[in-house]
Image: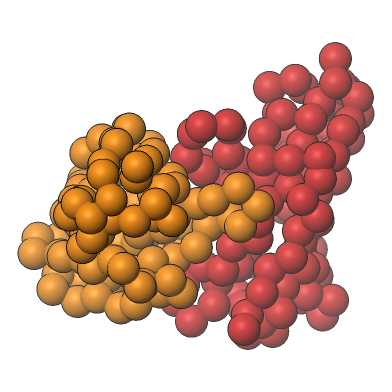
Chain colours: A orange, B red
Amino acid sequence: DVKVTQSSRYLVKRTGEKVFLECVQDMDHENMFWYRQDPGLGLRLIYFSYDVKMKEKGDIPEGYSVSREKKERFSLILESASTNQTSMYLCASRDLTTYEQYFGPGTRLTVT
Amino acid sequence: QKEVEQNSGPLSVPEGAIASLNCTYSDRGSQSFFWYRQYSGKSPELIMFIYSNGDKEDGRFTAQLNKASQYVSLLIRDSQPSDSATYLCAVSSNYQLIWGAGTKLIIKP
C-alpha cells in the first residue's frame, strides 16, 4: 500500500518566515510533485521532480523552491512566506507504470 | 495552455439515482485519464483511470472516454450520501497531469 506522508497537517507562520514542508513516500517512486489547492482554482503544480536532485518548475513556482536529496523525500521551501501563500499544500508521488499519483494528507498553511 | 474543464456544480442528485460527471480536455495527445474523489478537508484519492475509448466499469462506477470528442465522464450508479464529494478529472500531458477544478456532487437522502 502506497504511503505518502507530510510533516504537518496544519501550520501557522508569520509573514517573512522561511517555511519548510516535508514529504516522504515509501514506494520507491521516482517522480514527486508539490501542488497547492485553493477554492475554485483546483490543483496547481508548483514544482516536480523526476528523480533525485532533479527538479522542474510547474505552473506557479514563484516564491517557492524545492529540494530532493533522497529518492523518498521531496521538500518544498517558502523562502519568505507571504499571506498569498496561505493555502492547502499537497504532495504526490507517481507510479510510472500507470501514471497514477498518490497524495499525502496535505498541509494547511496559514501565513499571518 | 492545456486545459481540463469541469462544471463546478454543485450537482445535486437524489439517493439511488445515477450521477453523471463530465470533463473535456484540450490536449489531443493525452493518453491517460483519471477520476479522483476528494472529501472536504482531505486529499484526492483515485477512483478510476481509463486509457482506451469506450466504457470501463468498476462496481458502481463507470468511466467513459471519447478521444475524438475529447470528453471523459464518470457515472455513479445507485448514488449514496457517502458519494457526496468533489470529483476531480485529471488528464496526462507530457508526463504531467493537468487537473480540472472539480465538480462538487451532493447526494440528497
What residue is rendered at 50% in x and 51% in y?
A37
Query: Relative to B94, is A53 above or below?
Result: above
Horizontally, is B98 left or right of A28 in the view? right
Quarter of the figure that contains the N terminus of chain A: top left
Query: Relative to B28, is A64 above or below?
Result: above
Residue at the far left: name it: A69
Front residue of B50/B102: it is: B102
Residue A96 is at least partly visible in this image: no
What residue is rendered at 85% in x and 21% in y?
B108
Residue B64 location (% of width, % of height):
78, 58
Indicate the quadrant where residue A50 lies: bottom left
Indicate the quadrant where residue B24 lies: bottom right
What residue is rendered at 61% in x and 57% in y?
A41
Residue B100 location (% of width, % of height):
65, 60
Residue A54 location (% of width, % of height):
19, 76
Horizontally, is A53 left or right of A33 in the view? left
Residue B39 location (% of width, % of height):
58, 32
Quarter of the figure that contains the C terminus of chain A: top left
Front residue of B58/A8: it is: A8
Horizontally, is A25 left or right of A61 in the view? left
Residue B37 is at least partly visible in this image: yes
Query: Relative to B4, is B39 above or below?
Result: above
What residue is rendered at 63% in x and 80% in y?
B2
Horizontally, is B56 left or right of B42 in the view? right
Count of number-bearing discs:
0
Front residue of B101/A25: it is: B101
Residue at the far top: name it: B109
Indicate the quadrant where residue A64 lies: bottom left
